[in-house]
Amino acid sequence: MTTTAAAPAPIRPAGYALLRAGPAAFLIHRRAALVAALLTLVLAAGCVGYLSLGEHVVAPGEVIQVVRGRPSPDGLVVGALRLPRLCVGLLAGAAFGVAGALLQTVARNPLASPDIIGITQGASACTVAALTFGIGSYAVLPYLSVAGGLLAAALVYVFAWRGGLHATRFVLIGIGFAVALRSVTQLFLTKGDYLVAQKAQVWMVGSLNGRGWAEAVPLAWALLVLVPCVLWAARAQRTVSMDDDTATALGVRLGRTRLGLATLGVLLAALATGATGPVDFVALLAPQIARRLTRTAQIPLLCSALLGACVVVLGDLPARMLFAPTELPVGVLTAAIGAPYLIHLLVRGHSGRRRAAGGSA
Amino acid sequence: MTTTGDRTASRLTARGLTLAYEDRTVVDGLDLDVPHGAVTVVVGPNACGKSTLLRALGRLLKPRRGAVLLDGTDLARLPTKEIARSVGLLPQTPVAPEAITVADLVARGRQPHQHWWRQWSAADERAVTEAMARTDVTDLADRPVDELSGGQRQRVWIALALAQETDLLLLDEPTTYLDIAHQVEVLDLVRQLNHERGRTVVAVLHDLNQAARYADHLVAMKAGRIVAQGPPAETVTAALVRDVFGLGSVVVPDPVTGSPLVVPGRPWQSPADG
């Protein structure tokens, strides 16, 4: 163990490739890049499958013709029905994935996903309240849902703040609000008339049913605006994964960085919920699976986005087909897969606590 | 209250510093000049406010009143990233991100020197390589931090603070959880850094004898105030030990270094043996 003698071989963080361009230099995690490339392939294949399969099966070659804008006899089924629905699924899934990754990072807790800390419940409560009061237009509901999600997050934030954002308090207060908001929703459902309740019930389980360009286009614009913020987050996320003292000593403005990351996560979750309704467990699952695949020290954002999109798109395909012509909401399917996985996480987390103790204290 | 001779110049000072958690005042109206280019060790009984003082010196704790000044400017008025290029701090119980490797963790010490568009430079590589060589963790570079022993892990954290390449280094009980050999190793490293690089070090230590051995300037605290400070040879006396720790002792010259060695009174004995 005597390495001090001669000039030691230069050390670079293991597993990273260095990308240089003039004065700029970026560290790229090799395994994460590989996983991202593979996920892109899976997602691309999934998209083609999504567009070609269904009650009316279209050959993949024909699907590609339609996507490229060529005239085709299947233009209506693929281009007007399946393609916009696919776009909503991709965008919302990616947004859920990144939202979960950011909130889990800030809270240092894998349970801190928007559907557990009250954001989606806030969106539900707001939407159901609007339906009860007779505001039933599909043009207004998504915006109300976004507002509800943001409002719930703001409440959780205000109540969790005590001279700083304490991770555990944030999660616990979020869970409290989630329960409270769920009962508010139930109250509106019981009070409202039968038709409202039915309409609300459909919305309350996230679904891509009947989603089209009207949802896809505003969501795409909103997410496009947030892309620079996500790039910032990818870097900032690194710094908040250390303990508070070390991060502060390294010159990180911890409070501000955390607030920025949490706000971005909440925005993404609220936007996605506005478009599809609460698709359970995607935000919880995608980042955890992504991290296990890439083995990075923090949750990888790009892979979380890709996995979120994969889960929603590949979940909606059987949801559409299993009981055709009746369509299952995709939220039912993601919940059916998600719940066992959550239990698995909790059981494993219990037996593997010694190892995890380094990261979650 | 003696000053340390020629080392009166000070980059880091505290003026009228009052520190409190919620409504409990821990340090009250404290003044301190950290001697430049020297190893300062803060000692005192449990809960005397020594770690709290160190946290305030490293701007981890905002003063209730008074200020900590770096080169004459209040820390509260300096950008935190700028402070991080001058002052490094190793907290008492740092926590690594799950599954991070040693080299990755040490590289994070370069954070204050990096930008989002320049995540790695030749200077970063040199600093990390050197910090890891100095702390003898080069061979551990690719190992996950979770799997290391306590002594190895502490050396990795010190490497992170070294990679930050600051003139001032604050260490909060850097020898806790280490066996005696590793304690000596860490303290020797601190002294070496100070002598070869002229780095100013402030460390909080539990062990009064280690403090007397390694400090150029010793600060003894009790109940949030500085009771005595100066070179250990002039500061550590049986009277001080009784005053600060409430312990009867004999102070003799250390047989190796000649620094004061505190030998506590006789252990309890059964009256029958007497």
Image (cartoon, rainbow, N blue to C red):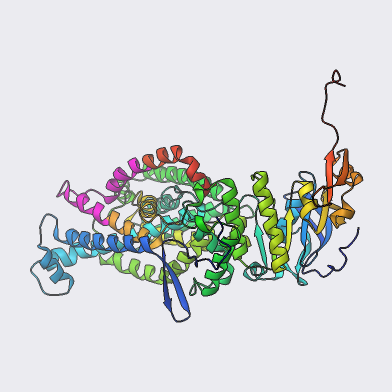
Find residue A77 and report its horizontal and vertical position in percent.
14, 63
> Which quarter of the rendering shows the C terminus of chain B?
top right
Q: Is residue B246 left or right of residue A288?
A: right
Q: Is residue B215 left or right of residue A327?
A: right
> Which quarter of the rendering shows the N terminus of chain B?
bottom right
Find residue A88 and report its horizontal and vertical position in percent.
28, 62
Q: Is residue B17 above or below residue A179?
A: below
Kindly report the secondary structure that dominates the magenta region of the rendered protein: helix
Residue closest to the far bottom: A22
Q: Is residue A141 above or below residue A348?
A: below
Which residue is rendered at x = 78% and y = 56% of the image? Answer: B215
Q: Is residue B71 left or right of residue B152?
A: right
Find residue B158 and report its horizontal and vertical position in percent.
62, 57
Q: Which residues are magenta?
A: A313-342
Query: Toward which corner of the image does residue B230 lie, by quadrant?
Result: bottom right
Is residue B61 magenta-colored? no
Residue closest to the eye, A145 or B98: B98
